């Protein structure tokens, strides 16, 4: 090897060593005093789920801190009123890491956070992948409303696999891999968004031949689905 080539090889080796030894970038954390697009998107989530009132102004004050703490408490997270990696993941958002002066939150995370989340996302994908985002969240919310009702099994898997409850179970489409939209919709429902206002049933009036389901009181219509109690 020539001296020039040896010099280049040495420089490359030194560069690789510097990269390997460099400290990792600090994860973004939002707290009182932060501002910008990241804060706005977190506030929008908190307002949507009922933890925060008012408007999303992009300023992380005491009201936002209290709302984050309430979200953390409900979801079994460390309660510090700050949005770090764990809280952001539970909210379904990805912090930009651009600092408190600006930046934006990327599209809601498509990461699966639990077995229940995965199963609920599969149900949403199988039953409502052609619906609007709100319509997909609504389908997930019906499952969670059933879990909370004394008339149904008290677990997500129990509700979904209850005999005759969902056609996607009998036809096998429940086993398909959910896309990122279904995953996000399931997480939004798990975090408290219920576009149906407490409905326990949904159906497509153009597709079903079930006479019984048509006897239920329809509370709202979202896309192709009627949501009823």
Image (cartoon, helix red, strand yellow):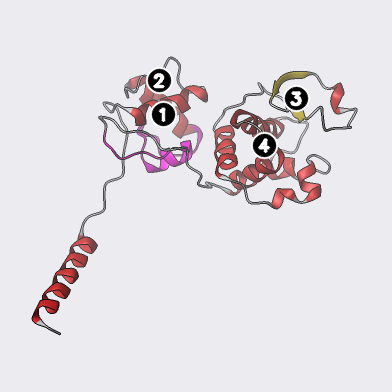
Report the predominant secondary structure element of the magenta stretch: loop
* Residue at the spot of label 4: 130
Distance (Cα) linking label 2 and label 1: 8 Å
Distance (Cα) linking label 4 and label 1: 26 Å
Label 3 packing within 10 angstroms: few (<14), some (14-19), many (20+): some
Image quadrant where residue 186 sits: top right
Q: Where residue 13 appears, x then y in whole percent?
A: 18, 71
Q: Nearer the viewer, residue 163 or 220?
A: 220
* Residue at the spot of label 2: 56
Secondary-structure class at tag 1: helix
Q: Quadrant of the N terminus?
A: bottom left
Q: Nearer the viewer, residue 148 or 3?
A: 3
Secondary-structure class at tag 4: loop
Label 4 packing within 10 angstroms: few (<14), some (14-19), many (20+): few
Q: Nearer the viewer, residue 216 or 162?
A: 216
The magenta stretch is 74-99
Instruction: Say whether residue 95 is magenta.
Output: yes
Secondary-structure class at tag 2: loop
* Residue at the spot of label 1: 41
Q: Where residue 57 appears, x then y in whole percent?
A: 36, 19
């Amino acid at each position: 090897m020539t001296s020039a080539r040896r010099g280049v090889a040495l420089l490359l080796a030194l560069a690789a060593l510097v990269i390997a030894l460099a400290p990792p970038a600090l994860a973004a954390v939002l707290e009182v005093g932060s501002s910008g697009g990241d804060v706005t998107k977190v506030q929008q989530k908190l307002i949507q789920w009922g933890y925060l009132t008012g408007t999303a102004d992009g300023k992380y004050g005491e009201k936002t801190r209290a709302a984050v703490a309430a979200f953390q408490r409900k979801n079994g997270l460390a309660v510090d009123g700050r949005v770090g990696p764990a809280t952001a993941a539970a909210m379904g958002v990805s912090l930009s890491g651009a600092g408190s002066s600006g930046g934006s939150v990327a599209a809601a995370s498509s990461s699966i956070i639990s077995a229940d989340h995965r199963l609920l996302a599969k149900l949403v994908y199988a039953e409502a992948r052609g619906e609007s985002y709100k319509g997909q969240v609504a389908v997930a919310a019906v499952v969670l409303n059933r879990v909370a009702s004394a008339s149904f099994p008290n677990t997500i898997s129990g509700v979904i696999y209850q005999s005759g409850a969902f056609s996607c179970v009998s036809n096998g489409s429940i086993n398909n891999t959910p896309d990122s939209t279904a995953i996000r919709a399931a997480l939004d429902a798990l975090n408290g968004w219920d576009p149906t206002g407490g409905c326990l049933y949904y159906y497509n009036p153009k597709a079903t031949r079930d006479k019984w389901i048509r006897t239920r009181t329809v509370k709202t219509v979202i896309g192709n689905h009627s949501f009823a109690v």
